[in-house]
Image (cartoon, helix red, strand yellow):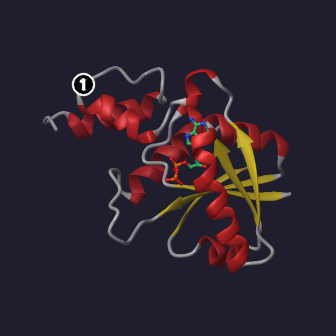
């Protein structure tokens, strides 16, 4: 089975990578779909940077493809001929938003099924891209949260200060 794992990945963390690795073992093909936000919510890393970091950190996984998408996930799913979405759940607090998205996506495209993968636990439960950006902005050590290429990219972005 082919699955789509959509998200902002701004930037990719060990939490995302854990989900990607577990999906790559369970499914034939995994499309990591990076949201190219064209609207008001600007991303920290550009779409090119986010894709490059994902490519670098998943290159050992041969059945994982990195792609960009914009607009509706329901339409992207149609275009890719893949109707199974993967989302990660860290804590109960993720659930309400994720359930709303899953229901809306199914309303827009009745074939869409969203499967949830529960976080590995431990520090993955509170790990998010935004917390990583926050720590890095103050010069904190993020090496336990993100792979080395991401750590370097964050250092580069913040080297001139916030
Ligand atoms: P969004 O799509 O809301 O911008 P992200 O790009 O940060 O979110 O994450 C994509 C998906 O990965 C979401 O389903 C999110 O819940 C999940 N995720 C993010 N961080 C973790 C983590 N540490 N453990 C498990 N799942 C995670």
x and y percentages locating residue 126 in the rendered image: 52, 30
Residue 136 picture quarter: top left
Disc 1 secondary structure class: loop
Q: Position of residue 113 (x, y in %)?
A: 79, 64
Task: Count residues near mark 1 (Cα–Cα under 10 Å), then give few for <14, some for 14-19, many for 20+.
Answer: some
Residue 59 visible to an observer of this rendering: no
Q: Quadrant of ligand 1?
A: top right
Q: Quadrant of the C terminus?
A: top left
Q: Residue at x 55, y 32 (%)?
A: 14
The number of numbered badges drawn on the structure is 1
Q: Is residue 102 visible?
A: yes
Tell me if 71 is positioned left or right of 27 in this view: left
Q: Is residue 111 left or right of residue 132?
A: right
Q: Where is the N terminus found, in terms of image quarters?
A: bottom right
Q: Is residue 79 left or right of residue 68?
A: right
Residue found 61% across the figure and 53% down from its top: 96
Q: Indicate the position of residue 151 as horizontal and vertical percent values.
A: 38, 30
| Foreground residue among 95 and 44 | 95
Say which of 88 and 63 sits in front: 88
- Which residue is label 1 attached to? 139
Instruction: In the rendered view, tell whether residue 36 sits above or below residue 138.
Output: below
Q: Residue at x 44, y 40 (%)?
A: 129
Establish if 121 lies above or below 60: above
Q: Answer yes or no: disc 1 within 8 Å of ligand 1.
A: no
Q: Quadrant of residue 83?
A: bottom right
Residue nearest the viewer, comparing 119 with 16: 119
Q: Which residue is at a point 66% across and 74% down the rendered structure image?
A: 74
In the rendering, at what x and y percent does residue 11 appear?
Answer: 43, 44
């Amino acid at each position: 089975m082919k699955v789509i794992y959509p998200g902002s990945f701004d930037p990719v963390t060990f939490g995302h990578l854990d989900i990607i690795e577990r999906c790559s073992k369970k499914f034939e093909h995994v499309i990591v779909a990076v949201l190219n936000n064209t609207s008001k919510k600007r991303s920290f890393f550009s779409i090119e940077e986010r894709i490059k970091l994902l490519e670098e950190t998943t290159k050992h996984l041969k059945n994982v493809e990195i792609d960009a998408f914009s607009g509706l996930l329901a339409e992207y799913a149609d275009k890719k001929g893949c109707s199974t979405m993967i989302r990660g759940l860290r804590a109960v607090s993720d659930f309400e938003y994720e359930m709303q998205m899953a229901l809306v996506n199914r309303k827009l495209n009745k074939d869409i099924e969203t499967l949830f993968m529960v976080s590995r636990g431990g520090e993955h439960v509170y790990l998010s891209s935004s917390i990583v950006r926050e720590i890095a902005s103050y010069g904190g050590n993020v090496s336990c949260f993100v792979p080395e290429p991401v750590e370097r990219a964050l250092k580069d972005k913040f080297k001139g200060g916030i």
